[in-house]
Image: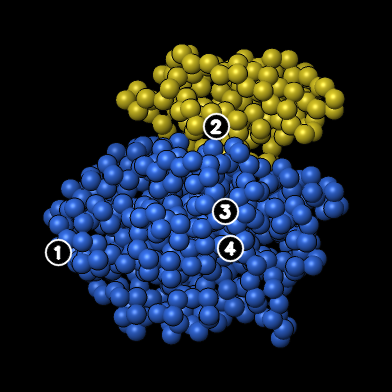
Amino acid sequence: MRVPGIIFADKQLLDHAVGEKTIDQVVNVATLPGIIKASYAMPDIHYGYGFPIGGVAAFDTDSGIISPGGVGFDISCGVRAMRTCLYVDDIKNRLEDIMGILSFSIPKGLGTRGRIKLSADQLKQLLKGGVRWAVKNGYGWEEDEYFIEENGCMETANPDFVSKTAMDRGMSQVGTLGSGNHFLEIQAVDEIYDSKAADLLGLEKDQITIMIHSGSRGLGHQICSDYIRVMQQAALKYGIKLPDRQLACAPLASPEARRYYGAMACAVNYAMVNRHCLSHWTRKVFEKFFGRSSEKLGLGTIYDVSHNIAKMEQHNIDGKTREVCVHRKGATRSYPAGHRQIPEKYRAIGQPVIIPGDMGRYSFILLGTEKAMSESFGSTCHGAGRLMSRTKARKQIQGSELKKELFDKKGIVVMAGSMSGLAEEAPQAYKDISRVVDVTHFAGISKKAVRLRPLGVLKG
Amino acid sequence: MVDLKKAGKKYKCIEHLSDIGIEFYGKTLEELFENAAEGMFSIICDLGMVELLNRRNVKIVPEDTDPENLLVLWLEKLLYLYEIDNILFSGFKVGKIHKRNNRIILEAEVFGQKADPSKHNIRTIIKAPTYHMLKVEKDSRHGRWEGRVIFDV
C-alpha cells in the first residue's frame, strides 16, 4: 500500500464491508501509482470488481494513473432531480394513471431503442456538445445546463477516441432509461432538515419532485470495455503491477490516458444528454396529463450529478492548490458553498448532492461541504449500496408480491419491465439509505437538506 | 464444482454481491466458449423459449493470444449483436480456436431468435463481462477446461 485506506462508516456498515471482503479492494486501489493521501470508501461501499463501489481516489498528474475500472462500465451513471409546483394532493388519486403513461412513454430496458435516431455525424456532435446540443435540437430548456455538473458538457470530449462499436451502440439509445437499478420516480418532499437550503432549492413539504437515475448506456459500457483492454497493454508497457486485471490503468501523462479521458468525456456528455432527454419526455407527459405547460408546472431542474466519473480537478494538498485526477466510482461530487463550479443560485448553500435510495424508503438531497474538500477530495456517497446479491434477492423475493405490498402498505405505484428485475431491486436488498446519509452528515462530507419519499416508481 | 462436472453440467451461476457471475466447463476450449455463451444468455432469459431461427457468423481476432481476453471479446460481441440486431441467442457452434501470426482466432456460428416481448421474458440485462476474477484454464487432473466470468448488470 502506498497510502492508507479511509472508510467512512458506522460500526454496522463497517462490519458489513469487512464481511464481504470489500476492504481488500480498498487496499488494492491504495497500491496504484501516484495515489494521493488515501484510498477512500464512502459509507455505501460494497464489493465491486477492481475498485470497490463507493470508492474515491485522486492521482497526481505526473506520477499518477487513470483507470477505466475506477470509473466503471456505466460511465457518468448519475441522477437528475426536478421540482414541480404540484403537491401530493394534486396527484395522489391519479398516480396510477400518470405512472401508466410514463411507463408507456419512457423507453426502458437494455437494447431498447429510443425515439431519437442519430447518424454517426449527429452522434459525434452530441458527444462533443453535450446538453447544449440537445437544447439546440429542441430537447429541454436552455436554463437546464446551468444546473448540471460541468454545465452539461465536458469540453475534453473527443469522439475520435470512441470505437465504431461504441458509436453503433450509442446511435439508437439516446433517451432510454436502461435497466438494473435505473429508475424514474415521482417523489414527494417528506422532510426538510435545512429550511434556507430548501428555499433556494425551491422545495417545501409535500411538494412533488421527479428523480431520474440513468447513465451512458451501451456507448459507455463499450468505451469502458475497449479501454480496459488498452490499459492492460499500457500497464505492461509502463511496468505497472496490477493486483486485479480490472484495475488496468495508464500513466496520466501517456497517450493511452489522453485517449481514454477524451472517450470517457464523450460518455459523460452522452449520459447527461440521456437524462436530459428523459426529463424532456417526462415534462411532455406532465404537460399532457395536467393540461398545462411544463413552465407553468414549474418543472425545472434542481440538479444533475454523476456518480461514476474521473475528472481533473483543483484540490488543496498540503497548503498548495494542485490539479489531480479524482476517480469517483459510486461516489458523488460534494462541492461546498462558494465554489465557482456550482450554480450561482446555490453558491450560498453548496452543491446539491442527489442521493437515490431504494424504491420503498427514501431518497435525499444533500449539500456539499468544505470538509468534503479536505477529507475526501470533494466527494460523498452515491446511494444505499447493496446488502443482498441479485441472485439471492431473486430467490427470496417475488416481484409481483413486492409490487402489491408496496402499493397496499405504502401506496407506492410500481411499474417494471421485468418482475424478476424488480425483485433484484427490492428495498430489503439494499442498506438503509438513512443510515448511509447520516454517516456522511455526521462526518461532515455532505449535509442533509431534504428527504424525499417515492410515490410512483418506473423501473427499467 | 466436482459434482457439476460429474453431472455433465455446462455452467452454473455464482454469487457476487453487486453483480452476477458464471462458472462453466468444457471438454475442449471450444466447448468451454460455447457453454460460457449459453450460460450468459441463460441469465438474460429462459433459453427454452428461444428458437433457432436467425443465424450470425462471428469472428474474433484479438491483438494478443490470451484466451481470457478472447473469452471477454466473444461474450461482448454476442451482447453487441443482441443489442444492435435484437437477437437472443441459444445455439453456439465454435470452430477450432487456432493461432495465426501470433494471434488467436475464434470463428463461430450463433443461432437464435429476434427478441419478442410477448414470448421472451427478459430476466436480467447484462451490461458487460468484466475482467474481475476472470478465468480460462485447463484442469490437468480431469483434462477439462474450466472458466469463470463476472458480469456487470
CA gap, disc 2 and disc 3: 21 Å
CA gap, disc 4 and disc 3: 9 Å
Image mark 1: chain: A
* Proximity of marks 1 and 2: CB atoms separated by less than 8 Å: no
x then y, percent, for residue A346: 42, 79
Q: Quadrant of the N terminus of chain A?
A: bottom right
Residue A455 occupies quadrant: bottom left
Residue B14 occupies quadrant: top right
> A372 or A164, which is in the foreground?
A164
* Proximity of marks 2 and 3: CB atoms separated by less than 8 Å: no
Co-location on one chain, circles 1 and 2: no
CA gap, disc 1 and disc 2: 45 Å
Image mark 2: chain: B
Q: Secondary structure at mark 4?
A: loop
Q: Which mark is residue A155?
A: 4
Image mark 4: chain: A
Residue at left offset 62%, top offset 54% = A158
Q: Which mark is residue A266?
A: 3
Chain A is shown in which shade? blue
Q: Which mark is residue A89?
A: 1
* Proximity of marks 4 and 3: CB atoms separated by less than 8 Å: no
Disc 4 residue type (three-letter): Glu
- Mark 3 closeness class: few <14, some 14–19, many ≥20 residues within 10 Å: many
- Mark 2 closeness class: few <14, some 14–19, many ≥20 residues within 10 Å: many
In front: label 4 or label 1: 4
Specify the chain shown as yellow.
B
* Proximity of marks 4 and 2: CB atoms separated by less than 8 Å: no
